[in-house]
Amino acid sequence: MSVNDAAFQLSEEDLEFLVALLRSSAVPMTTAQLIDSLRGRIR
Amino acid sequence: MVTTEVSELTFEGTKTEKALAKEVLAVIAGRGQFMAADAPIRVDVDQLVEYLKGTERKVTGQTIPKLVELNPGVFSIVEEDGQTFIVASRLGRSPSGPDAASTHSFHERLMTPEPRPERLASTLRPRPRGDSTWSTLDRVLSEFEIGEGDHALRRMMDAEAASIASTVVEEEVGTPAATESAAEPKPVAEAEALLDVSGMGDKDLANALSTHLGQDSRVAHFGDHWMFEDLVPRLSRGDLRRIKDYIEEQEQPLTDDVLVQDVLEVRQKSSDFEIMRFALNFRLGSEHRDFEFVGTNDQRFWSVSNLPPIGTNRRKATEIGADYRFMLEELPTQPAYRSVSQISHVMSFYEFYLGLLPYDPEIQALLPAPLVSGQRSAVLTFECPQSYTTYLVELRYPTPNRGGFLLGLDDFFNENLVPGALLSIKATENDGHFIVEFEESESQSHRLLELEDRRQRYVFRPTSFNCQVFEDYLLDEARFPGFSGDKPMDEKARKKAEAVVSKAFERRGNELEGGGFGASFADLLAASNTERPFSESFLRQVLEGDESGAFAPDPDRPDAFTYIPGSLG
């Protein structure tokens, strides 16, 4: 799967979820933490 | 006020009935003068009749029902527990139904609050949207002929235009039905999105985050870290000036850790340290005029424009990059950065003389990718446990017309190695720190090739060393007598790879009986690498791709070649 293909699969809702997550965090988050949160949202 | 409202109404019936209806409504409005204008007001019919009798009007028990019958839009009759009530509002409208009064009361609202929404309503700032005219992109593009090669691009643009157009249409239509359906949870659509995400690997997700989230202006992003932009502390002009002065004072690039502690004076154990470190990296990243990021994810070095260069001053970095241009073709199109943990490398004369290593496919697989887009170089640390020394090394990433290389190993090479030595480089957990070692051996002594700096001539000098070497790549006087007293080739001549290889044949000095020179491939690789860098594949390409016929495989020896002078154009 190419980068572009992958990028197109992130929905607007996922992005808004991540933005809200960052807004609620007082410290920087790593990419791995964001991915975990995204996966946690699915569960 | 009540009188005014009532006087505007018209009633049905005779003159007397109209006057009576008006008075009845006035009585009802008077009873409910503190109630809402359209709230139903109930008055007992018997009490009303009694009151009206007191005003000397001729009324009976049938008068009120008749009034109601004549003016159904104003009055209505309600019976409850055997009592009859006449109902009207201050505005003179018959209430729509008996439950109208209880549909929306404070009592109702306080005791039965609205259910909590499934998801909190977003209070975020609206994202910038594409203009609605983008939806006509398809029509505009259809006027141009699109070739086969443009189909992929066209598909991508179609998908993007469709998504933007659908977003705009959703926003612009705005009918109540559409709004309601948008506000409701969309289990099907959400399930689809979640399935997509769950099916993606971490690497693809990271790429997707970088592509989409990284472009969101509300989000601050540096390397592997993310933060809400409004929450990132800002650096004052004074902070920026002090950071710049400090780097200049230290005369070398400094890491974010050092700058946050020494300049911003935030202790490493402080709770603010991580935030300030992120803030420093993110804010300096937008100060392109004064600062340049030259680090890796784990070692974030920052540099300023007027620092002394790392590494040799014997040759300009741009010239070295041009020398390694041939390496661009050897690098893979999809680099697998940090995919190997250790490499071995045999050092050439060119590398030894300039204290550098080539950015070849093997080293590329060991080193990290550029962390930020457009990053030109990265400062790495190379630790040599054998000499208890750590060297600051500058990795110059390849550009479209120059090859990459690592500078700054002059001292390590001069103190420990000779051209032809074998060294190993190991990656560590820190992606900017490496362990460099050489294989030790018994002390040996040879007359080895050197280039005198002052006179710019090749000489052989007795040299003792105790590192393991590849004998074939050792440039000693016995094998390469032609170098003695010779000058390096001039810039113009050394640009021609064939000229450098033919010079290598002559310096090897192995004249053939029938004329010309012979040399093994290893001899040629060692000797050619004195003038300019050659990889094995590049040298074979020159030897085997020569159209003049000057070079030919030696029929008598394996992996050897011959050269007939005068054949080269």
Image: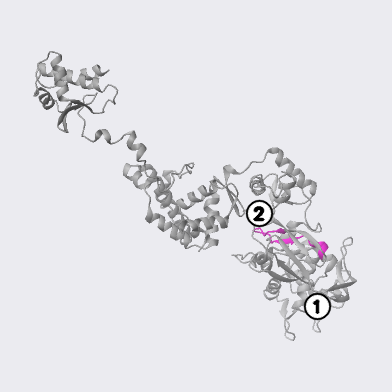
The quarter of the displayed image where residue B26 is located = top left
Q: Earlier in the sequence, mark 1 or mark 2?
A: 2
Amino acid type of disc 1? Glu
B449 vs A8, nearest the viewer: A8
Instruction: Tell me if mark 1 has few (under 14), some (14-19) or many (20+) residues whose alpha carbon lies within 10 angstroms of its own.
Output: few
Looking at the picture, how far across and down is residue B453, in whole percent?
Answer: 87, 61
Judging by the rendered image, the residue that carries numbered circle 1 is: B471
Looking at the picture, how far across and down is residue B365, in whole percent?
Answer: 65, 66
Residue at mark 2: chain: B
Amino acid type of disc 2? Gln
- Residue ranking furthest to the bottom: B556
Magenta region includes residue B550: no
A37 vs B85, nearest the viewer: B85
For the question of whether residue A18 can be seen, the reply is yes
Badge 2 marks a residue whose secondary structure is loop
| Left or right: where B244 falls relative to B36 | right
Judging by the rendered image, the residue that carries numbered circle 2 is: B375
Badge 1 marks a residue whose secondary structure is helix
Can marks 1 and 2 be said to lie on one chain?
yes
Looking at the picture, how far across and down is residue B469, in whole percent?
Answer: 80, 75
For the question of whether residue B8 can be seen, the reply is no
Residue at mark 1: chain: B
| Left or right: where B61 falls relative to B211 | left
